[in-house]
């Protein structure tokens, strides 16, 4: 089993990708990243370093000028603001939107129930989306990825608008989905909330369109957390 995993292709490989929005420095400048196995992987970096652009390229919303992106499963984006991606009025109808074609009515209903159960929203298929809390909406967006058979979740600051309780719920949900024994998912999670780094399987820093080496999340959090005023670094 371990040997099989060692020889399995990485869930995501980004190889020397270049992309510019036009004018000035390219947003991605020979950017490479290898997610070694399923799990929760985090990406941090200052504003404008190219993180969101990279996720859009991996999701196929943009095309690179050069380089290569290879994923072993279907990618799905989860944005900071779930209102930007939940389109239909009820939870169930929204989940059906991303499902593969050719499913029977019963199969679609079963997928809706299963996806809702997996994110802790059982029985909410008929609930109007506008009655959900911010954290519930974000979990519904994740259910949409599950209902559409995505195996690679691309999360762009998914907790930035959430209170601490909802933040933890979403983080723990993704952690569970990425560490389950059967068909674990792979998540690439962008964050500016450094405490989240403690829960990842590894973290990288992006700077000026390029990505550095993998580091343990807690080590990176300690390095990036500003010291309280008046305390010198030892
Ligand atoms: N739609 C766009 N049109 C033109 N330029 C863009 C567009 N989106 C991003 N850029 C530029 O690409 C560069 C990288 O932006 P990107 O949004 O990927 O950074 P980021 O790391 O996600 O930043 P943040 O932490 O603020 O979300 C920036 O210089 C930005 O101005
Ligand atoms: Mg961004």
Image: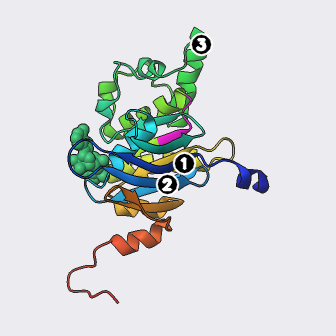
User: Residue at image x 50%, y 44%?
Assistant: 68
**Residue topped by disc 1:** 13
Circle on res. 37: none
The Cα atoms of the two marked residues, 1 and 2, are separated by 6 Å
Sequence order check, earlier mark of 3 and 1: 1
Which is nearer the eye, 65 or 167? Answer: 65
* Relative to 138, 185 lies left or right: right
Of the residues tagged 3 and 2, which is closer to the observer? 2
Q: Secondary structure at mark 1?
A: strand
Residue 4 at x, y = what percent?
77, 50
Q: Quadrant of the C terminus?
A: bottom left
User: Residue at image x 20%, y 45%?
Assistant: 23
**Residue topped by disc 3:** 103
The Cα atoms of the two marked residues, 3 and 2, are separated by 35 Å
* Relative to 148, 93 lies left or right: left
Q: Secondary structure at mark 2?
A: strand
Question: Where 225 falls versus 79 (above or below)?
Answer: below
150 in magenta:
yes
Q: Determine the image quadrant of residue 92.
A: top left
């Amino acid at each position: 089993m371990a040997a099989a995993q060692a020889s399995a292709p990485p869930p995501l490989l980004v190889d020397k990708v270049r992309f510019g929005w036009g004018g000035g420095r390219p947003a991605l400048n020979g950017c490479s990243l290898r997610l070694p196995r399923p799990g929760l992987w985090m990406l941090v970096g200052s504003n404008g370093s190219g993180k969101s652009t990279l996720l859009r390229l991996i999701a196929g919303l943009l095309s690179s000028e050069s380089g290569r992106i290879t994923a072993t499963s279907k990618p799905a984006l989860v944005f900071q603001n779930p209102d930007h991606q939940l389109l239909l009025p009820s939870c169930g109808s929204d989940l059906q939107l991303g499902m593969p074609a050719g499913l029977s009515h019963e199969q679609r209903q079963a997928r809706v129930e299963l996806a809702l159960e997996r994110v802790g929203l059982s029985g909410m298929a008929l609930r109007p989306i506008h009655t959900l809390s911010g954290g519930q909406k974000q979990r519904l967006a994740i259910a949409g990825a599950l209902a559409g058979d995505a195996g690679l979740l691309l999360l762009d600051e998914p907790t930035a608008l959430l209170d601490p309780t909802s933040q933890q719920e979403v983080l723990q949900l993704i952690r569970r989905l990425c560490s389950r024994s059967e068909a674990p998912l792979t998540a690439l999670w962008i964050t500016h909330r450094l405490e989240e780094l403690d829960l990842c399987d590894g973290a990288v820093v992006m700077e000026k369109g390029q990505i550095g080496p993998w580091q343990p999340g807690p080590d990176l959090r300690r390095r990036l957390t500003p010291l309280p005023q008046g305390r010198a670094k030892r």
